[in-house]
C-alpha cells in the first residue's frame, strides 16, 4: 500500500517519502543514511526540471542529521572504515553535481555539502578511532554510559572533525 501511495505523488514528495520511510526503520546508521542520500541525489532531477523541492528536502534531511535531530546509530553498528567511505562517496557525488550545475542548484549543493562531514579513505576513519582510544587509555578516561565523554567518544567514531582531533 505504501508503494501505491508513492506512485501517485510527484518527484519532490516521493523524495520526502523515501526519507520518511528510511528514518522509520528500526535499525539504521549514518553509513546507510549517507548511502541513501547519495542514491537520492543522483536520481534527483535538475533544479530547472523541478528538482528544487527534492534537493531542498535532501538539504533539510542532511542538516537534521548533522545537528543530531536524527539518530546516528540505532540498533546498528558500523565500522568507521565503511562510514568514512560512505561519507566520501556522498561528498564526491555532491561536488560532481555542483560542478555540472549553476545558479540556485549550485547554492543548494553547497548547502548540502556543508551539512555532510568530510569523507576520507576508509582507513582514516579507523585510524582516528584507534588514536582516540589510545589517548583515552593513556589518560585513564573511562567510557561511562550516558556521560558526555561516552557521547563524545561515539560522535568521534561516527563523525569526527579536525577540531575534535585537536580537542582530544
Image (cartoon, rainbow, N blue to C red):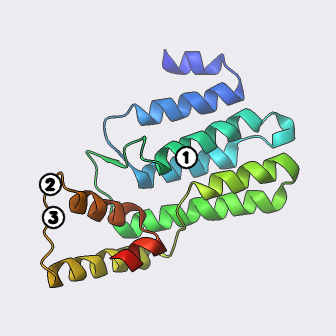
Residue at position x 45%, y 73% from top? 163
- Which sits in the foreground, 65 or 15? 65
- Quarter occupied by the C terminus: bottom left
In the displayed structure image, the side of residue 164 where residue 60 appears, left or right: right
Alpha carbons under labels 1 and 3: distance apart: 28 Å
Question: Pointer 3 and pointer 2: residues touching (CB < 8 Å)?
Answer: yes
* Callout 3 secondary element: loop
Q: Which residue is mark 1?
A: 63
Q: Which residue is mark 3?
A: 143
Tell me the tag on residue 118. none
Please tell me how crowded label 1 is: few (under 14), some (14-19), or many (20+) other residues with Cα within 10 Å.
some
Alpha carbons under labels 2 and 1: distance apart: 26 Å
- Which sits in the foreground, 162 or 45? 162
When the figure is inspected, residue 137 is found, relative to residue 74, above or below; the finding is: below
* Callout 2 secondary element: loop
The mark nearer the N terminus, 1 or 3, is 1
Question: Pointer 2 and pointer 1: residues touching (CB < 8 Å)?
Answer: no
Residue at position x 62%, y 42% from top? 58
Q: Which residue is mark 2?
A: 145
Residue at position x 16%, y 85% from top? 138
The mark nearer the N terminus, 2 or 1, is 1
Amino acid at each position: 500500500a505504501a508503494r501505491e501511495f508513492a506512485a501517485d505523488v510527484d518527484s519532490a514528495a516521493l523524495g520526502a517519502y523515501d526519507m520518511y520511510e528510511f528514518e522509520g526503520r528500526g535499525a539504521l546508521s549514518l553509513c546507510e543514511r549517507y548511502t541513501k542520500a547519495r542514491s537520492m541525489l543522483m536520481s534527483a532531477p535538475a533544479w530547472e526540471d523541478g528538482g528544487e523541492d527534492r534537493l531542498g528536502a535532501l538539504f533539510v534531511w542532511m542538516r537534521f542529521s548533522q545537528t543530531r535531530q536524527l539518530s546516528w546509530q540505532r540498533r546498528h553498528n558500523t565500522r568507521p572504515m565503511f562510514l568514512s567511505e560512505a561519507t566520501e562517496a556522498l561528498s564526491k557525488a555532491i561536488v560532481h553535481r555542483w560542478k555540472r550545475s549553476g545558479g540556485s542548484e549550485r547554492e543548494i549543493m553547497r548547502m548540502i555539502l556543508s551539512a555532510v562531514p568530510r569523507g576520507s579513505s576508509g582507513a582514516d576513519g579507523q585510524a582516528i578511532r584507534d588514536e582516540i582510544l589510545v589517548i583515552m587509555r593513556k589518560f585513564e578516561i573511562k567510557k561511562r554510559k550516558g556521560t558526555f565523554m561516552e557521547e563524545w567518544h561515539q560522535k568521534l567514531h561516527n563523525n569526527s572533525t579536525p577540531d575534535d582531533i585537536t580537542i582530544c
